[in-house]
Amino acid sequence: MSNLRIGQGFDAHKIKKGSNNFILGGITIDSDYEIIAHSDGDIISHAITDALLGASNMGDIGELAPSNKENEDISSIFLLKKVVNLLKTKGFEIINIDLTYIGEEPRLTKYKSKIKDSLAQAISINSNQISCKATTTDGLGYEGNLEGVSTQAIVLISKS
Ligand SMILES: [Zn+2]
């Protein structure tokens, strides 16, 4: 039997009208909205980080970087890289990542390939191993009411 493991991650943050940087997957997105979060609020990086921690059974992002003074404004890409390195030291290899961003604002259409490249570089894999999808909820719930945005991520890893 091959040593495959699957993991899933979810993250959501509040948004409000504003002009602070909106960072998703390490890319700054032009938007009339901004994220309200303890960290940089990069839900895409957070969801992937949690999915990797889940697949490798190493806890969750809250244990790795609790919402305290020390982790204020911490770069989510930095955290993601830290977890990728942890996985490497345990002999895990990332096979693919599939993510779904859910939000009314901002729209990701023109950023999807940039986000894939940014994540691929951070994770040291090929951008064709990452799928970046985006959807809305047709006006339903907090994403539809422009109160927040969320991301779901699924990863497949293998142990060599
Ligand atoms: Zn988060």
Image (tube, helix red, strand yellow):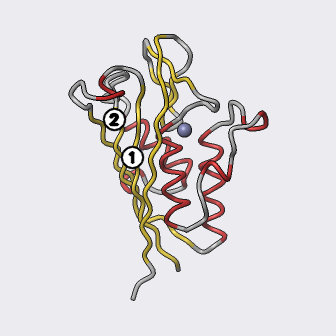
Q: What residue sits 45% from the left and 81% below the top?
A: 3
* Image position of 73 (left or right of 145): right
Mark 2 crowd level (few <14, some 14–19, many ≥20, 10 Å Cα): many
Residue drawn at (21%, 28%) of the image: 138
Relative horizontal placement of residue 86, taking residue 157 as reference (left or right): right
Residue annotated with mark 2 = 102
Mark 1, Cα crowd under 10 Å, few <14 / some 14-19 / many 20+, is many
**Where is 118 relative to 143, above or below?**
below
Q: How far apart are labels 2 and 1 at the CA level?
A: 8 Å
- In the displayed structure, 34 sits above or below 18; it is below
Q: Earlier in the sequence, mark 2 or mark 1?
A: 2
The amino acid type found where label 1 is placed reads Gln
As drawn, the label of residue 152 is 1
Residue 6 in the figure: left or right of residue 58: left
The residue at the point 51 percent across, 62 percent down is 54
Asked if the residue under mark 1 is in contact with the one under mark 2, i.e. CB atoms within 8 Å, the reply is yes
- Residue for point 55% across, 71% down: 92
Question: Could you say which is closer to the camera, residue 29 or residue 142?
Answer: 142
